[in-house]
Image (cartoon, rainbow, N blue to C red):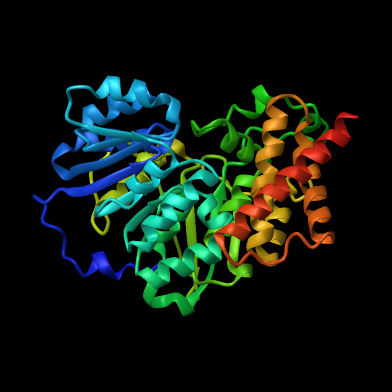
Amino acid sequence: MADTRSRQTDPGRAATAPLRLSILGASGSIGTSTLDLVARNPDRFDISALTANTNAEALAAAAIRVGADHAVVADESAYESLKGALAGTGISCAAGASAIAEAAVRPVDMLVAAIVGAAGLAPTLAAVRQGTTIALANKECLVCAGDLFMSAVRASGATILPVDSEHNAVFQVFEQGNIEQIECLTLTASGGPFRTYTLDEMRVATPEAALKHPNWSMGARISIDSATMMNKGFEIIEAHHLFPLRQDQLEVLVHPQSVVHGMVQYSDGSVLAQLGAPDMRTPISHCLAWPRRMHTPAQRLDLAALATLTFETPDPVRFPALRLARAAMTSGTAASAALNAADEVMVKAFLERKLGFLGIAETIERVLERMTASGDLNEARSIVDVMAVDAAARRVSLEELSRIAH
């Protein structure tokens, strides 16, 4: 796990000293949840920079609402809209990839890394190299470049606080002083909308059905990844990099109620678990206030009303994505990067009705087999290598889709 001593030995930043904070990806679901907490606790935070991809209007409104110093939109064509919306506010603004990178390295106490996709890798890595404390919500940093990313964390002394609800849950019950006594950690999965579907039913599942997650409100890709359970496969890869355990100590349980988010089992038979309502403001707040806690409006659990919590083993036949993710994790960074890229292409194709639901995992597997046979999955030693694998996987993925279409 990333070293966490830096802020733990700092008693605390006095309660009256606001946390200097930047948010990359402020208009996404994690970003907006973070901004909600900031707006509810204005005395606790001092906002340096907010960034967004294309939504200049939402970015400007958020920057004004929380009193940010600086706002950046990745889409350069949106710059004039952003500039106009911020005119007279005293908030500076910029646009483009280089401006995002500059925002990432502004001096802050914490950076919330919530840019979706591979676009978040470079700026988050730049912040890591500064030794910044990172509230990490970008999966690609660990799925596509985990070894490289964590090597940079160790070299700089940066602190990584996991925002993902499952990894944050494990982080809360992971006893650093008893690592040798940990037998396994378990990430829970809701099972998605197709948990009880037969293979025949899954074969004809529509995008509309796949997007209807039973518990969480999420973006399109992560909702589809939840339906295939590829998202849980990615989370296993992330856990492999975040926590110093063997791969065979990382487990998944399907838990339809999404109340228990993660568990750690110890050698004395104890299992420590974190429970909470399915509200991302809980893990986000844990990171923002760490090593203390802060109030959130999240619904409080009524266990008597819930009455029953159920668990089941994932079905490897109906959800082969878990197997593909574990194989990629074993193979290394290049395979994980290819898995992520191929998944992004296939999810898009499914949403556009160019591929059936079961075809997502089936086609990804063919892409990985082809790339393995051609030697394209030799270990990636740099971010340049990772991006080359990403590009190759997208090319092979499109070729496979073309074969299906014909």
Q: Is residue 105 above or below residue 351?
A: below
Q: Is residue 128 visible to us here?
A: yes
Work out which quarter of the rendered image holds the C terminus and state it. top right
Residue reaching furthest left? 16
Residue 167, horizontal then vertical, whole percent: 46, 55
Of the pair 147 and 391, the residue shown nearer to us: 391
Residue visible at 58% across and 58% down in the picture: 384
Residue visible at 59% across and 63% down in the picture: 250
Of the pair 282 and 401, the residue shown nearer to us: 401
* Left or right for 108, reference 235: left
Residue visible at 48% across and 54% down in the picture: 262
Q: Is residue 397 above or below residue 245?
A: above
* Left or right for 67, reference 394: left
Q: Count the marks: how many? A: 0
For residue 36, what is the image quadrant?
top left
Work out which quarter of the rendered image holds the N terminus and state it. bottom left
Residue 45, horizontal then vertical, whole percent: 19, 43
Residue 125, horizontal then vertical, whole percent: 44, 57
Residue reaching furthest bottom? 180
Residue visible at 8% across and 50% down in the picture: 16
Q: Is residue 242 visible to us here?
A: no
For residue 240, what is the image quadrant?
bottom right
For residue 201, what is the image quadrant?
top right
